[in-house]
Image (cartoon, rainbow, N blue to C red):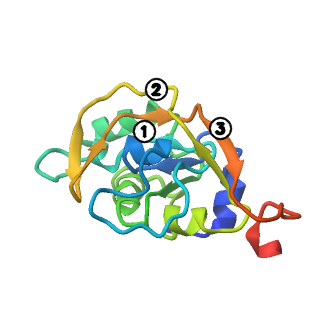
Amino acid sequence: LRSLPDHVYTAIDRDPPLLDVRSPDAFSGEILAPAGLQETAQRGGHIPGAQNISWAAVTNDDGTFKSRDELEEIYADHGIDGDTTVVAYCRIGERSSVAWFALHELLGYDSAINYDGSWTEWVNLVGAPVETGESDDCAERGSRTLFGAASGSAPRRSAGRTERGNLAEPESRSPHHL
């Protein structure tokens, strides 16, 4: 159920390991947080290798979840079929719990986990890699509003650049080894 930073480091190089459910603007690094929220993240962007499928893409306008067939199609379009571990994250682990519930409870993908520290924890870790920029697939499939900011439901795959936001390069990829 719960993912820690070490799980995320392990997942970075797998395809598709990470599911960023934030808005396309947060994914690309254009914004740090939805309008009206104070943010503690120091940088914008996403975890390298993450795909962007908005949390809102799995719900109907009335707040109910889409049908099983629709959910399977949304995730299968991005290679998520329950055969490998998927780590869902957002800003603070709240919206990613919607994706976790859809994957784990509704689709039965037992290997789905939620990174509850999410972007706020990740981006503040010394040495954690961050990727910015648009994704390869930026076709809009609609949007909804969350906390006053548009939350697009377009699936996105990163095509940006990766950087390390730290004062010194770590000896290993994990911040626990510093």
Q: What type is the residue that disc 2 sits on?
A: Asp
Residue 137's mark?
2
Mark 1 and 2 residues: CB-CB less than 8 Å, in contact? no
At a point 58% along the width and 31% down the height, the residue shown is 159
Name the quadrant of the C terminus: bottom right
Quick one: SS at disc 1? helix
Q: Which residue is mark 1?
A: 75
At a point 66% along the width and 63% down the height, the residue shown is 7
Q: Is residue 25 or residue 97 the one in the foreground?
A: 25
**CA distance for labels 3 and 2:** 16 Å
Q: Is residue 145 or residue 98 the one in the foreground?
A: 145
Give the vertical position of 39 relative to 156 (above or below). below
* Numbered disc in front, either 1 or 2: 2
At a point 89% along the width and 64% down the height, the residue shown is 171
Tell me which label, 3 or 2, sits earlier in the chain: 2
* Numbered disc in front, either 3 or 1: 3
Q: Is residue 55 or residue 42 the one in the foreground?
A: 42
Tell me which label, 1 or 2, sits earlier in the chain: 1
**CA distance for labels 3 and 1:** 24 Å
* Numbered disc in front, either 3 or 2: 3
Q: What type is the residue that disc 1 sits on?
A: Tyr
173 sits left or right of 62 in the view = right
At a point 42% along the width and 67% down the height, the residue shown is 39
Quick one: SS at disc 3? strand
Tag 3: Cα neighbours inside 10 Å, few (<14), some, or many (≥20)?
A: few
Q: Is residue 165 or residue 170 the one in the foreground?
A: 165
Percent across and percent down for residue 145 are 21, 49
Residue 161's mark?
3
Tell me which label, 3 or 1, sits earlier in the chain: 1
